Image: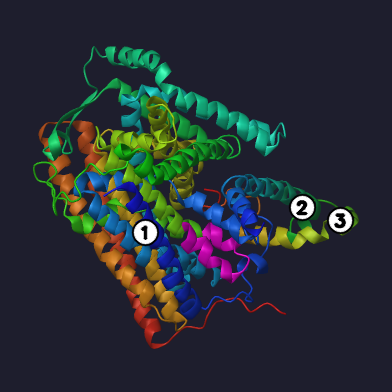
Amino acid sequence: MNALIAVVLGAITVYLTYTRYARRIDRDVIQSDPKRATPATLYMDGVDFMPTNRNILFGYHFKSIAAAGPIVGAIVAATLWGWLPAMIWLIVGVAFMGWVSDYSAIVLSVRNEGRSLSAVAHRLISPRTRTILFLFIFFYLLLVAGAFVGIMATVMETQPRTYMGMILLVIMGLLLGQMLYRWRVGLVPATMITVGITLVAIMTGHASEPIFKGLNDGLNSLTGGAPLVTYFDPTLAGFKGAEAKIMPTLLFWALAISIFCYAGSVLPIWRMAQPVVYVGFWITALAMVLGLSGAAIGTFTKPEVAYFSIPAFKGWNPQMGPAGVMPLWPMLFVTIACGAISGWHALFGSVGTARQIENEADMLPGGAGSMLAEFLLGMLALLAISIGAKGNPVAAFASGLGGFISVWGFPPDYAVSLAFAAFIVIVLVVTQLLFRVMRVTLTEWLGEIIPPLRNQHVASLVSIGMAILLVMTGTWIYLWQLFGAANQLMAALSLLLVTVWLVSVGKHWLFAGIPMIFMYLTTVASILVTAYNLYFNVYLPNLDAGRLLPTIGSGLMVLVAVLLVFASVFIGIDGFRAFFKYLGKPAPSARPAPAEG
Amino acid sequence: MHGWQVIRDFFYGMTGYQFVHHAREMKHDSEALFFTVTLGDLIGVPIMPPVYSLRLLPYVVPEIAAWKRQLARRREFWEKEEYDLHSV
């Protein structure tokens, strides 16, 4: 297998899915009508409800959904089961489920006056569904925040070449906010200055490596080389499991990332979060464009960087740790979430994109088009890991992507530095936003019962503290899979809502109903498998050894898993009840009246 | 030319649009405060004598409908934080 064939396969998938399946559903089932008034035109308020050009909205939606998910998921899945199952799931998932989830969430909101998923659930299913969704979203965010902080701290601990780039990213983000909103500098010159300086710092990161290595050595000498926490990690020693140590450097970088996220969470969004995301976007986009095009032409010009070097298939049920199991079904389907199907997209699509749809004909390119574009990002990550195959999964990804970038003539050191930075940047910018959303969700959920949580600093610190506790368990792969399961369950719940709505308005529902049933059963099963793995592979070994922090952290994860299962069962029961209620007697449509003329 | 325009719009959507979106939110916040102080009696907050509100009225009429729609979606009219995930 080589990269060119994979790129062509990806392009064919996108073309066939969009033209042969998605367009047909849009035309025959949803019957999108360009003359029907959308919430953006009916309720235009100049802020949230704002009719927007379809191409702008496509870019906006794509940028909002394309984050670390497709990259990390593909890396982990290829490491566990090989590249072939991962590629098949990416293709089948996006073709029959992913675009359906994104597109139908937007349709649902547009045809329900721009309401969010939880508001539609409140109307169509039951009031308690909305409350359960809040609980669900908070723990979902906690899991992804814990997984991301853990991944970043681990990479930064071992890659001092990334530090200078990250420091400059933050400084340039702050400068960009000041330039745009206070000094009124134009976007183009401000972008050239800030992105240019960050890029130079990133690509020359290997030059500053010795200085930061000294810093890490100094930090570790504070405890005389002794670890802060020792824990049992089932992913080590070829997945047989071994003792692992958390050194002061890892805690230092986890805390540094947390301070950055805290600032991103409590400062006005224009001051830090938004401009850092913007600078980070250019860095990642540059690496991805150079990487994807390098993968395509590298087959001819530099064949040694374009051939897959990891096994196509590693087994149906790789053993991880002494008692752990990792069956391909259901675990592969939650390990790769974004890129195949993702609940986050539905969540964002319903409250962000749907309220800006100018014309119903724009729902398909905005929802399905963006999802198919993100699938290509997942394919690129899979190519990179399949070709890299050196060191830990993230190092292999960076080595593979660096190889693709080097096709363009960049020296390998510069190319690999850019690839590492692209990975960290994409995770870092998402994490700071996660804590921001987590803080708001926590306040909304518990602010009335626990008044101190209405304070943004308290809510931020509580969120960050819980995430750090999860990081100190050390087992980010389980954390990732639990997050993936929560994310996919969110997608299943969104599809459940869409199915109930389709039935309620008397439309064909199978195109959303079949993916919903598959994702619902798969995700609930995967949460149970992960809870089993966590209990026997992490909780019990750490408890037996009397290690307090890893025991509390892994116990918390098992508890979250159980909560997620209960929440999904409640929502499922209510949803299926509503489904059968409307199956016999469709409800009147809540869609707005057609516009005049 | 059309293809070039599509690409330009797509990149604008990925890049500059977020700043425009946020600038609109900031403008709305300032306007909401201004409207509440000057035309608060429209939502039951009598702050200024109506005679001054009447003098301002011709200038702000186009914005009043949008202001009321925004306020109607908040739990309290002074609340700034919106509990959804836009701009993320």
Q: How is the image coloured?
A: rainbow
Looking at the picture, which amino acid does disc 1 mark?
Ile
How many neighbours does mark 1 have within 10 angstroms: few (below 14), some (14-19), or many (20 or more)? many
Residue A578 in which image quadrant: bottom left
Taking depth in this image into account, of B4 and B39 the one nearest to the observer is: B4
Q: Residue at x 23, y 12 (%)?
A: A224
Q: Which residue is mark 3?
A: B59
How many neighbours does mark 3 have within 10 angstroms: few (below 14), some (14-19), or many (20 or more)? few
Q: Is A400 inside the magenta-drawn segment?
A: no
Q: Earlier in the sequence, mark 3 or mark 2?
A: 2
In percent of width and height, residue A145 lies at 37, 41
Q: Is residue A210 above or below residue B55?
A: above
Looking at the picture, which amino acid does disc 2 mark?
Phe
Q: Is residue A319 above or below residue A405?
A: below
| Helix, strand or loop for disc 2 | helix
Looking at the picture, which amino acid does disc 3 mark?
Tyr
| Magenta span | A350-370
Q: Name the front one of labels 3 and 2.
A: 3
From the viewer's perspective, is A411 left or right of A44? Answer: left
Q: Which residue is mark 1?
A: A341
